[in-house]
Image (cartoon, rainbow, N blue to C red):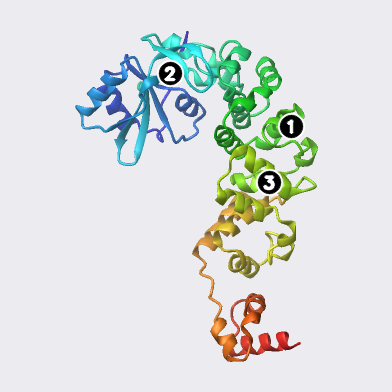
Amino acid sequence: MKTMRMSIPSWFPHKQIGKVVRYLGGNETTRIVGGTVRDILLDREGVDVDLATSLAPTEVQRLLAARSIKTIPTGIEHGTISAIYQPGQICEITTLRKDIDCYGRWASIEFTDRWDEDAARRDFTINAMFMDLDGNIYDYYDGLNDISRNVVRFVGNPVRRIEEDALRILRYFRMLANMGLECIDQPSMGAAITLAGNIATLSRERVRQEMCKLLVAPHACKVLQIMLDGGVGSYIGMTDIRPTDIADIQFGLDYLANLAATMLTTAAPEAAVEVISANWRLSNKEIKVLTQLCDRTSAKKYPLQHLHQPVNIHKRQIFASGLSFYLHYIKLLATSEKIPLAKIEELEKMAVSYQPVALPINGHDLIAVGIAKEGIGRALKVAKKIWMAHDFCISKQDLMRIILDKILD
């Protein structure tokens, strides 16, 4: 085992988590673990706080309850308790364990008091380290060396790790998309590609969860190319996407926009959306947005075609499609335009604060001037186009006059 001491970054909730650790016996019984340690080493502000402890789950519950800390038996049969260490903030506390039999998501486990046995069951070396609240790191599988080189490597035998849970294939590629491709562990990569067929055993919800996270990682595009080139696409609903066609996509932080950009490289984006929706079990809302983003016919009719267009054109787009879609749409446009992130953030800020001026006429107004009921829908569409074209400044009287002229023509 290797050890190292480092300063814990200021973004980590040291004081609050420190109380939890002390209540559970201190550094000897409870330590920071896994992805939280990885994020601390990379100084990447994380969302989740994970702790490992040699105490039994029931003992964790008892000790925290004595300190008025509410716990949730998230996965108590596998040793995991969630603790609400402050309002709105949760950490997961898992009892040290070793896997006896592995068969997918849940393994047959046995609790242990040995830190090395718990490390041995974990997926990657960079996720198999522990850290106490004094900053001492305990590394059983050379994770410190791997993280210094941005290497993603399975703990032990890669084939065995994947056979224990096929989700580790997608987790491997997601980690790679976060860490980069400068130094690839070939046995790990080879196993992930060779055993890609095992993805078929996973639930679609688990596939969706990993892929949506992968799509917004810093190196997502290059990793997705590797996956497609290695045949992994066949098992995640991306059979018709060619690696070379996505090479120039500038992936951003909106997974639906990135996914739409990928779908738009195919001959039939709408069909590609149907396939991906089924393979990932996307929600109805996600399917609606993705379908709209991939509708080339509608896109050609949108006021906004390029992000560099004037602000008034952006406002027309917000009026035409609504704020929610606009925010996805500008991210889609950004995948093919070299736009600084600051510009996207500026547009988002503008859009959120902008209040579109409502169309000053309605169906009753149109009926009052003699337009038949069956023509109201068409007349309102014409009205919206005129209203946008005049940047929402034309008077109600002038708007009505132009509508009548166009309809009568």
Residue 286 x, y percent position in the rendering? 58, 49
Residue at 58 percent of width and 25 percent of height: 167
Relative depth, front residue between 7 and 226: 226
Residue 228 tag number = 1
Q: CA distance from mark 1 to mark 2?
A: 35 Å
Instruction: Please give the name of the residue rendered at 27% of the width and 28% of the height, measured from the top-left corner.
Output: 19
For the residues marked 2 and 3, what is the alpha-carbon distance in whole angstroms? 42 Å
Dot 3, how many residues are within 10 Å of its Cα: few (below 14), some (14-19), or many (20+)?
A: many
Residue 292 vertical position relative to residue 3 in the rendered view, above or below? below
- Residue at (68% x, 32% y) in the render: 223
Provide the residue designation for mark 2. Answer: 130
SS label for mark 2: strand
Secondary structure beneath disc 3? helix
Q: Mark 3 or mark 1, which has the lower sequence index?
A: 1
Foreground: disc 2 or disc 3: 3
Q: What amino acid is found at the position of numbered circle 2 in the picture?
A: Phe
How many residues crowd around disc 2 within 10 Å: few (fewer than 14), some, or many (20 or more)?
many
For the residues bearing labels 1 and 2, Cβ distance under 8 angstroms: no
Residue 84 shows which numbered tag?
none
